[in-house]
Image: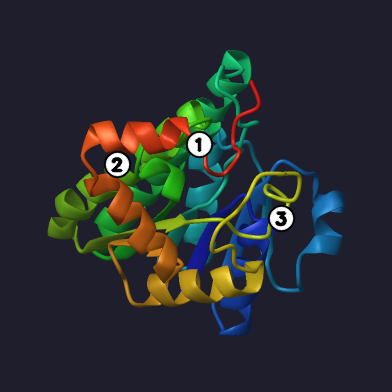
Amino acid sequence: MNVFITGGLSGLGLDLSHRFLADGYTVGVCDLQSDDEAKPLLKTGIQYFQADVCDTMRMSVIIHQFAEANNGLNIMVANAGISMPKTKIPDFNRGRKVIEINVIGVLNTFEPAIDIMKEQGHGQLVGIGSVAGTVGLTGVAIYGASKSAVINLCESLEIDLSTFGIHVTTLAPGFVETPLTSHLKHKMPFKISQEEAVNLMYRAILKKKGLYILPFKMMLLSRFLYHLPRPIFKYLQKQDPLGLTKQ
């Protein structure tokens, strides 16, 4: 069994790669760093590919290389992504980069993986969404939109690709202690450690869950907010209960 993880040199991607390796999987990861920069971060045995997920051709080449070298591709985790500062008026230049990496990067990752998995008749795609993509929260308009796109993409593919024996899992974590959240100053309800998040995500992948929001309390909160009457929801968001926005 083998797994390929994008954005595999930091945060959840790095820990997931080590978790799969420890359980006997053949693991490949890609990220932006050079081979020399990546080597100290990865455990022995992990295959590393330098690549930008926004580079369509490069992603196709390395994913096919990994599959050919390891007799197929069992699990593809589209983990690479970036965040942006939370504010009422988005930084649109940063926002365009967020969309490019968080959405187009997922397309560039899934496309070659689907080709491989369709031919072999089995496989699993994993997209990393976010609770911010389940409902329109204040201060995270563009980031939330990027993760909403991933969630909708994966839920549609979950239906469409089942015909070809391909499972699709969408992971939507809430607040997790990672390098991406270390600089945040606002409240982070139900925040969990990176270790706990990886354990939950890993189990969800192995169980081939569909949409999995974590942790459980955050799932309940997101569902509650989603089903609120919109006037009440908008009123609550305008109160900025988490202190997300500064301007």
| Mark 1, residue position | 102
The answer to whether residue 129 is seen in the rendering is no
Residue 218 is situated, as x and y percent measured from the top left of the image, at 43, 61
Instruction: Pick whichever of labels 1 and 3 is earlier in the sequence.
Output: 3
C-alpha gap between disc 1 and disc 3: 16 Å
C-alpha gap between disc 1 and disc 2: 12 Å
Residue sitting at x 39%, y 50%: 113
| Mark 3, residue position | 10
Instruction: Tell me if mark 1 has few (under 14), some (14-19) or many (20+) residues whose alpha carbon lies within 10 angstroms of its own.
Output: many
| Mark 2, residue position | 153
Secondary structure at numbered mark 1: helix
Residue sitting at x 35%, y 45%: 134
The answer to whether residue 97 is seen in the rendering is yes
Secondary structure at numbered mark 3: loop
> Which amino acid type is marked by label 1?
Asn
> Which amino acid type is marked by label 2?
Leu
Query: Do the CB atoms of the residues marked 1 and 2 lie less than 8 Å apart?
Result: no
Query: Do the CB atoms of the residues marked 2 and 3 lie less than 8 Å apart?
Result: no
Say above or below: 164 vs 130: below
